[in-house]
Image: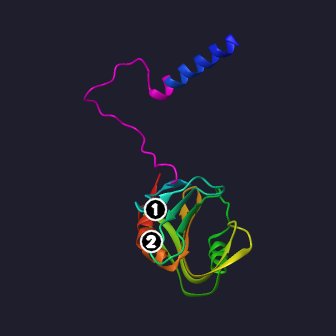
Amino acid sequence: MRMARWFLGAFLLGWMTVTLGCSGEEPQVGGEVSSPLVAPAGQQAAGVSWTKPARWALMPERPMRAATYLIPAASSDSEDAECGVFFFGPGQGGSVQDNLRRWAVQFERPRAAKQNQQVISNFIVHTLDLAGTYLSSAGSMGPATERKAHFRMLAAIVEAPDGLVFFKLTGPEKAVEAADPEFKALLASLKRR
């Protein structure tokens, strides 16, 4: 027991030395301090980072997601909107066209469907905008369990350095309409990590 305490104490002391930067050297005054810039958790995947809109709340980690954001409901909506960010690994998650088709069939007779491809910050970005009755499922890959009328989806697939990153914002039409400029700003903030 005494030996275990000694090892624990030695481990903690070593950890604190590394973590807190207690190298024993005197700090330099007036010198240039350099530290790697790392995007906060929930704002990076596959070699890219982005800036979360201020109004969006970062939610706890969920399986198969790089991030999940909650977007507040519009005053007349009964629920919030959500933006899930997915990265499955290099070469994983299916092709761009497979995902665009899969998302499109999540709506019954979608109206005002718009598909686009553009270059944002030197990344090819495929976007999709759908509205109508959303066929919601309990999981991202499961069968539809609920029909939600007057819903909208804004989706983007970013061809990132380490694979495809999927951004999928769904919710009541008014909440998504309010989040549309923020979604575009998030995409405009993409940069190589």
Render colour scheme = rainbow
Tell me where residue 189 appears, x and y as whole percent: 41, 61
Q: What's the amino acid at mark 2?
A: Ala
Q: Nearer the viewer, residue 111 or 117?
A: 111
Give the farthest residue toward the top. Answer: 2
Check whether the beta carbons of the residues at disc 1 and disc 2 lie within 8 A of each other.
yes
Q: Residue at x 25, y 29 (%)?
A: 30
Q: Residue at x 51, y 69 (%)?
A: 125
Quadrant (top left, top right, bottom left, bottom right) of the N terminus: top right
Q: Is residue 87 above or below residue 72?
A: above
Q: Residue at x 30, y 34 (%)?
A: 32
State yes or no: residue 18 in magenta. yes
Q: Is residue 133 above or below residue 63?
A: below
Q: Give, as a single range, the part of the protein colored magenta.
A: 17-42
- Residue of label 2: 179
Tell me where residue 104 appears, x and y as whole percent: 63, 80
Q: Nearer the viewer, residue 15 or 116?
A: 15
Q: With 102 as the anchor, is 118 left or right in this view?
A: left
Name the secondary structure under disc 2. Answer: helix
Q: Residues within 10 Å of mark 1 (few under 14, many from 20)?
A: some
Give the main secondary structure of the magenta stretch: loop
Tell me where residue 151 appears, x and y as whole percent: 56, 79
Name the secondary structure under disc 1. Answer: loop
Dot label at residue 31: none
Q: Nearer the viewer, residue 50 or 109?
A: 109
Tell me where residue 42 appears, x and y as whole percent: 52, 53
Q: Which quadrant of the figure has residue 134? A: bottom right
Q: Earlier in the sequence, mark 1 or mark 2?
A: 1
Distance in Å between CA atoms under marks 1 and 2: 9 Å
Q: Is residue 27 above or below residue 117?
A: above
- Residue of label 1: 56
Q: How many marks?
A: 2
